[in-house]
Image (spheres, rainbow, N blue to C red):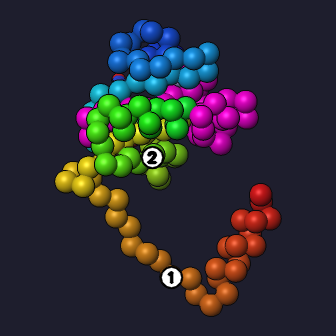
């Protein structure tokens, strides 16, 4: 897509610290990291949502997450890492080209995921369970 920043990075029109490149993916450092070494795994094909990713590309996506996470852990001496995929505006996606964040984490860092834990009413959990299962 012509006005998409990640398509431009994939095409080499905008510079990025490319850590890895294959036929279907690029991996580069996030310009505004949660912690230093925070990287993004980006499919070259322009899709907004992970759910639109062709299956043959999705398989490589899984393998790359593991490969890059290991490299980041070793390079940054992080104590942990988060994989984060913001899919859709409601989920906080700002760049509308699907991407996975890999964020090295330290027990002393200032990054917190916080949400309030909701409660199911009587029978509601079973309802959700069945509804989701039917769609698998
Ligand atoms: P989102 O909220 O869409 O999941 O995250 C988009 C991420 O892309 C942000 O963490 C942001 O710092 C990163 N980003 C946005 N523009 C650029 C850019 O031009 N270069 C790089 N390397 N990262 C970018
Ligand atoms: Zn794009």
Q: Is the CB of the residue bearing disc 2 within 8 angstroms of ligand 1?
A: yes
Left or right: where 3 falls relative to 54: left
Local packing at callout 2 (Cα closer than 10 Å; few below 14, some 14-19, many 20+) is: few
Left or right: where 26 falls relative to 104: right
Towards the viewer: 45 or 107: 107
Mark 2, secondary structure of its residue: strand
Residue 117, placed above or below residue 91 = below
Q: Which mark is residue 84?
A: 2
Name the outermost residue toward the bottom. 122
Local packing at callout 1 (Cα closer than 10 Å; few below 14, some 14-19, many 20+) is: few
Name the outermost residue toward the right. 134
Towards the viewer: 76 or 7: 76
Q: Position of residue 111 (x, y in %)?
A: 27, 53
Residue at screen point 29% across, 39% down: 77
Residue range highlighted in magenta: 35-63
Residues at marks 1 and 2 touching, judged by CB atoms closer than 8 Å: no
Q: Position of residue 20 (x, y in %)?
A: 47, 19
Residue 106, placed above or below residue 74 = below
Q: Which mark is residue 12?
A: none
Towards the viewer: 70 or 61: 70
In front: label 1 or label 2? 2
Query: Dividing the image into 4 quarters, which one contains the N terminus?
Result: top right
Residue 29, placed above or below residue 112 = above
Mark 1, secondary structure of its residue: loop
Residue at screen point 57% across, 27% down: 43
Towards the viewer: 83 or 91: 83
Q: Which mark is residue 119?
A: 1
Residue at screen point 52% across, 37% down: 65
């Amino acid at each position: 897509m012509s006005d998409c920043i990640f398509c431009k990075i994939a095409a080499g029109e905008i510079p990025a610290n490319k850590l890895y490149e294959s036929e279907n993916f690029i991996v580069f450092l996030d310009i505004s990291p949660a912690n230093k070494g925070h990287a993004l795994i980006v499919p070259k094909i322009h899709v907004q949502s992970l759910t639109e990713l062709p299956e043959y590309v999705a398989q490589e996506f899984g393998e790359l997450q593991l490969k890059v996470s290991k490299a980041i852990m070793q390079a940054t001496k992080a104590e942990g890492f988060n994989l984060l995929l913001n899919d859709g505006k409601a989920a906080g996606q700002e760049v509308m080209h699907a991407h996975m964040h890999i964020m090295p984490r330290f027990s002393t860092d200032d990054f917190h995921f916080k949400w309030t834990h909701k409660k199911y009413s009587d029978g509601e959990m079973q309802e959700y369970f069945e509804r989701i299962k039917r769609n698998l």
